[in-house]
Image (cartoon, rainbow, N blue to C red):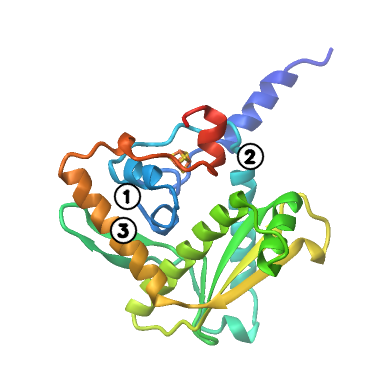
Amino acid sequence: MVTNGSRLKNLAISLLNTRTERDGQKKVGASQISNPCTKHLALALAGVEPEPSKYWLGGKVGTAIHSAIEAAIEHSDAEELVGARVEQKIVLGEIDGYGTVSSKPDLVLPAINHLVDWKTSTRAKTKKIQAWVDGTKQDAGTTYTMQKYIGQTQLYAWGVAQSGLQIDNISLVFINRDGTSDSDVLEYTFAYDESIAVALWNRLVVLWEELQNGVHPESYAGHPECFNCSVSGLL
Ligand code: SF4
């Protein structure tokens, strides 16, 4: 008799849901600072932990892809990778009363003054991202996503530049989780622009000051294009 099927399914789910160091991150980092939703950043600054998402599997697959790339980098002799920094902590700045704000960019390539961020995605989403990049169709949801990704990586580059390394360009490399071939890996490359990072940093500092002056984080409006809040009915 076949038994224990559902028990093993539950075991698989619980193993996949084992918390990682990344899950325990308490302070805000570049990915939250760049969030176009002020409410989200305010909640994160106030230390409010987001509810676990029921759409957790994509994130887990993404973490696994990051790990696979990191392992491959260790054994690669590609010339771009000479002196590469993988997931090395960088400091973005200090905020009075909050402390040091830091982040870990996926990959810094000092040999070519380049910063790379891996983004796992799906074919449906990268199709929209490609249209956004090409300028053929820029829907509000994809603009929200790209604004977040571009801001996040500009902040990384800013932190790296503050550590004394020059960054000229940034690449977002999208990998389709449901892909099958080379055409499921896409890139979008743009120039480092310090002013974007500084504007995001200044917004963070002002928000922190407002919270210290008694503004409640929930009083900020959520972002209409945020999938999380739209599906959980918070908006
Ligand atoms: S709208 Fe989205 S980004 Fe904003 S607080 Fe809600 S979940 Fe966070």
Q: Amino acid at mark 3?
A: Arg
Can see residue 143? yes
Answer with left or right where residue 34 lies relative to residue 114.
Answer: left
Considering only vertical position in the picture, is 48 above or below 186?
above
Q: Position of residue 115 (x, y in %)?
A: 52, 75
Q: Which mark is residue 157?
A: none
Q: Position of residue 223 (x, y in %)?
A: 47, 43
Depth check: give the residue in front, 182 or 230. 230
Chain-order first, disc 3 or disc 1: 1
**SS of the residue under disc 3:** helix
Q: Amino acid at mark 2?
A: Leu
Residue under numbered circle 3:
203
Where on the picture, by quarter, is residue 11? top right
Q: CA distance from mark 2 to mark 3?
A: 32 Å
Residue beneath the point at 29% across and 63% down? 202
Residue under numbered circle 2:
57
Residue beneath the point at 65% across and 32% down? 12
Q: Position of residue 39 (x, y in %)?
A: 37, 42
Depth check: give the residue in front, 44 or 179. 44
Answer with left or right where residue 159 lies relative to residue 235.
Answer: left
Circle 2 crowding by C-alpha within 10 Å: few under 14, some 14–19, many from 20: few
Residue under numbered circle 1:
27
**SS of the residue under disc 1:** loop
Circle 3 crowding by C-alpha within 10 Å: few under 14, some 14–19, many from 20: some
Residue beneath the point at 43% across and 73% down? 157
Q: Position of residue 34 (x, y in %)?
A: 43, 57
Considering only vertical position in the picture, is 217 above or below 10?
below
Between circles 2 and 3, the one closer to the viewer is 3
